[in-house]
Image (spheres, rainbow, N blue to C red):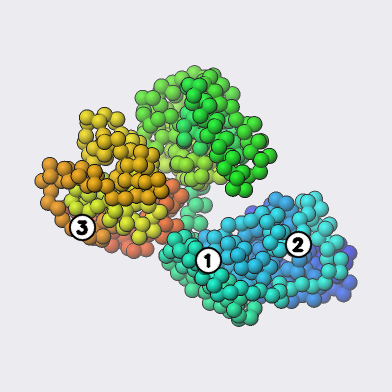
Amino acid sequence: MLGVVHHDDVVEIVLANPPVNALSVQLRSALAKALSDALSFPHVRGVVIRGQGSFFCGGADINELEQHNDPWLPDLIDRIEAAGKPVIAAIQGDALGGGLELAMGCHYRLATPSAKLGLPEVKLGILPGAGGTQRLPRLAGAETALDMIVWGEPISALRALERGIVDRIVDQDRIVAEAVAYARSGQGIRRTRELPFVASDEAFDLFKSKNTRRLRGLHAPAACVEAVRAAAQLSFDEGLRREHELFIGLVKGEQSLALRHLFFAERSARKIEGLGKDIARRTIRKVGVIGGGTMGTGISINFLSRGIPLTIIEMDPDGVARARNFITASYNTAIAKGNLSEDQVEKALSLLEVTHDFSALSGCDLVIEAVYEDIELKKDVFRRLDRIADSSAILATNTSFLDVNKIAAVTSRPNDVLGLHFFSPANIMKLVEVVRGTETGPDVLATAIEVSRKIGKVPVVAGVCDGFIGNRMLTPRQANAEAMLVEGATPEQIDRVHIDFGMPMGPFQMLDLAGLDVGWHRNPARIDNIKDAICSRGRLGQKTKAGFYDYGDDRKPRPSEVVEQIVGEFRERAGIPLRRIADEEIVVRTLYTMVNEGAKILEEGIAQRASDINVVWVYGYGWPRHKGGPMYWAERIGLQTIVDGLTRYRDRLGSTFTLSPLLKKRAAEGRSLNNE
């Protein structure tokens, strides 16, 4: 739990609570005792605190958020700060949350070049509750403190040095020696609480006004602003009390409960039935991607950025040049934004090969097909791939709804085949649906999960069905949304209801962004639905500046008279009377129906647990994080509420609608959908 090393007149205390040195009550107790013992020795001139492994300290134990066990972290940090001998934080790895608060309670801070420092508590719907909102602005000023605390993103050691959060950057192999020397240097004691901090009320009001949209409806970011404001207006001790009041209010709130559910849901998604840790993983040294379009190049960037050599196959010379140019342009944008250095980009691009020679895939350990969403085309690709790829290679299809088993069946090795459904833009979106086919081998599945995490994705395992987890749940939402257009709603009303709910965009805005031609049969003479009719007019979404909405150069959606006319024609042919549709009906028919479909997915074993569905929708479709995902949200408002709403509008839901027996049963029993 904790180690102590004596360097003559300096004591080194090593936090050892793997994997992230979380500040559990046991570690806090051990640290308090070790610190007290070290300071009691007359010959000791100072103390160094560092972490074991790749973390300095990852923060508090989330399971203890609502507990007040002695020693309480704020009290422990106060003791460190009040010490009569210098205490040095040697930040040799990430210092996050309570870990950074601990470091800021020390008198000086040294960090290695690769260290990251951050206060990500807002992502759990809370704020730093151990003095972080009071000490960080005293070290770094209002602007940096607000950015780090309100948005929760870590910064590099170099930026921390520039902003006064750390005092020196030291190489990894010298950090302990330099920290010990610092303790002996006679620098004296510098208590963060005693540093001045001045900021006007206008600075905080301006921050809020500039970020109105990002802050809308979110409790924790707003509380973070107020806590930092308190640091400027109150004494340090009064500011601590205000921080604690705000923290207590947040930790018991609905938004924090939802965000903490997601935190644990993401970790639960890694636990796959029948997939033990003893299953050997295949080694992925080189990756191939078939298709150099937007999706294929986006997928490729993930691997290149992690130092994995990659070959893209494009079938024509123009496609080869286009794919390489797209990736180069993406990396140049990253350089311009300061996210990557020129050296990092040069290294990534040196790992890239783009060619039309299919045989170049023969040396790849993982091949991902990313061609157009047509099953016959994909089957042809896999037949060819089966002949060329190494016998140990994993073959993956990036399909969003097609039958992975049928694709696998055209090969001689269906056990090596699975789906890897990336979300667009694939180099940014974190979700990957890992689709397990009937014959997918356990080692193939385990390797796909591992490599997805290696490239920074959040993998969720899904079974084979039309649309898997996410897109299958979109089907009833979209069907009802289009039906309500004919009945009397407008695209603007339906989208507004979803945006008010917390979605980044509504169903029709999302379709326009993705492109209405995705999945379209491309026959202008065949018009089966409103979407077909809109496509037949050449209105394919934002890329043509016309879809369900009209778009100008600013890409903002505007109501379309053409779409209004198309919808009116459908209404007239169907003989459906125009009526007023209430917002409540839109919620039931688009969101409640998604929950119902999610329950069916659980019944069929397509998803292993309800929380997996929540992870899919938060990371892949923009479900508001502070509402925890569709299945969590349903349980918070009550499963019986969902059942009653669906029953109330049953006659409006279409002849194919059926209520999930699992949903109905669990609602009647008052049980969770996650229960066995």
Q: Are marks 2 and 3 in contact (CB under 8 Å)?
A: no
Tell me residue 536's x, y (percent). Answer: 26, 34
Tell me residue 532's x, y (percent). Answer: 25, 37
Q: Quadrant of residue 345?
A: top right
Question: Which SS class for mark 1?
Answer: helix
Badge 1 crowding class, 10 Å Cα cut-off, few under 14, some 14 to 19, many 20 or more, is some
Residue depicted at x 52% and y 68% = 206
Q: What amino acid type is highlighted by mark number 3?
A: Ile
Give above or below for 467 relative to 27: above
Badge 2 crowding class, 10 Å Cα cut-off, few under 14, some 14 to 19, many 20 or more, is some
The residue carrying mark 2 is: 167
Q: Is residue 273 left or right of residue 54?
A: left
Q: Quadrant of the N terminus?
A: bottom right
The residue carrying mark 1 is: 207
Along the viewing direction, whichever of 206 and 512 lies nearer the viewer: 206
Q: What amino acid type is highlighted by mark number 1?
A: Phe
